Image: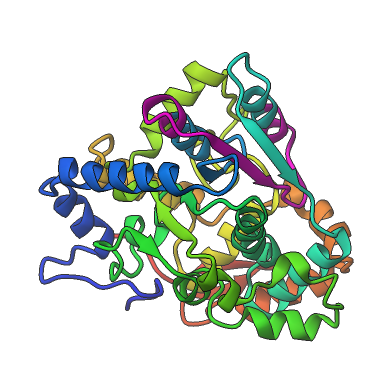
Amino acid sequence: MSTRPRITFDERGFCNACQWMEEKQKLNWPEREKYLKKILNETKKNKKGNYDCIVPCSGGKDGSYVAYQLRDKYEMNVLTVTVRPPLELDVGEKNLKNFTKTKDNFEHLHITTNNKSMQKINKLGFIEKGSPYYGWIVTVFTSIIRTALAHKIDLVFYGEDGEIEYGGSTQNKNNPIFDFKYIVKNYFEGDHQKICKKSGLSKNELHHFTLDEKEFKKNNLKLTHWGYYEPWDPYRNYLFVKEKYTFQETETANVGTFTNFAQNDQSIFALHTYLMYLKFGFGRATQDAGIEIRRGAMTREQGKNLVNLYDNQYPDKFESLYLDYYQMTKDEFQNVLDNHANKDLFEKKNGRWSPKFKIS
């Protein structure tokens, strides 16, 4: 049974992500870099404002790496932009400070959306979709795009296309530019307008959570992923920023996995990956093990053992934060988890969901 949305398998049983890893070995990367230089030169030549491009950046490994490449290798005038996440973690704040306060620091904007709006849409996303930071995911696109339009910037670089790299749809693998419809379908899960309407928030309160597609098209804004132009390697990015920006990891492994150097900006990510596990039967450890296996740093047997150890880890240490943030009782919170748990894959034992399946 396949539970990961938009995943497919070939006759060998290889998923999209593994097939893509093989395909990347044969791609003409110099040709892709040639196209990159073309759009960078066109953007510089035709720019209307001060900046050449935007790179969304939390201070983590990926955005920091991309921003550096664009500025220092390709001589672009980069504006880095952070959308403040809910329930920030200290290590994430320190990494962002290290990134923005170095002697060769980037120009940087820090967007803090209306807290009431963010909390309300995140709570609705949690209840309705099992997506606990849905509002923040939306603003990573809508707020960034609004910033680009306001500063007359025609080009925005995101890191990797998670759909292509991690086992989702590969329909866009040969398209360097993606449009607003792609965002709505794959990242907003098709119905963010419904969530916004249900929130009861005013137009002003929803400013950072909505976007007029006509305005997007009219301004000829280009959205692209850096992973289109060079082979994407999260571990390379980590090693680079650790040396360049004194990047810090968490002291112990993150909840639900064996790694400690990714997604350290907010505590809600642990709830997001736990819900992913309950809904689809794979969690953060599965994702991380898949990355390590595909890059040749781990055997499948090693990955399987780590998945069995970590995937079903409940984020106990953050639970009180979640209850306070969503303004829920523990029973109400657990009921949401119960509603989204895949009953074909899990059964309740001693108050916690346990898998009926085994990783083989």
Colour convention of the picture? rainbow
x and y percentages locating residue 247 in the rendered image: 57, 24
x and y percentages locating residue 168 in the rendered image: 36, 67
x and y percentages locating residue 143 in the rendered image: 67, 59
**Residue beneath the point at 33% across and 76% down:** 2
In the rendered image, is residue 195 in sight? yes
Q: Quadrant of residue 301?
A: top left
Q: Quadrant of residue 94?
A: top right
* Residue 16 lies in the magenta-colored region: no
Q: Nearer the viewer, residue 359 or 322?
A: 322
User: Does 230 sit above or below residue 10?
Assistant: above
Q: Quadrant of residue 357?
A: bottom left
User: Does 170 sit above or below residue 91?
Assistant: below
In the rendered image, is residue 359 in sight? no
Left or right, residue 286 beside residue 21: right
The outermost residue toward the top is 103
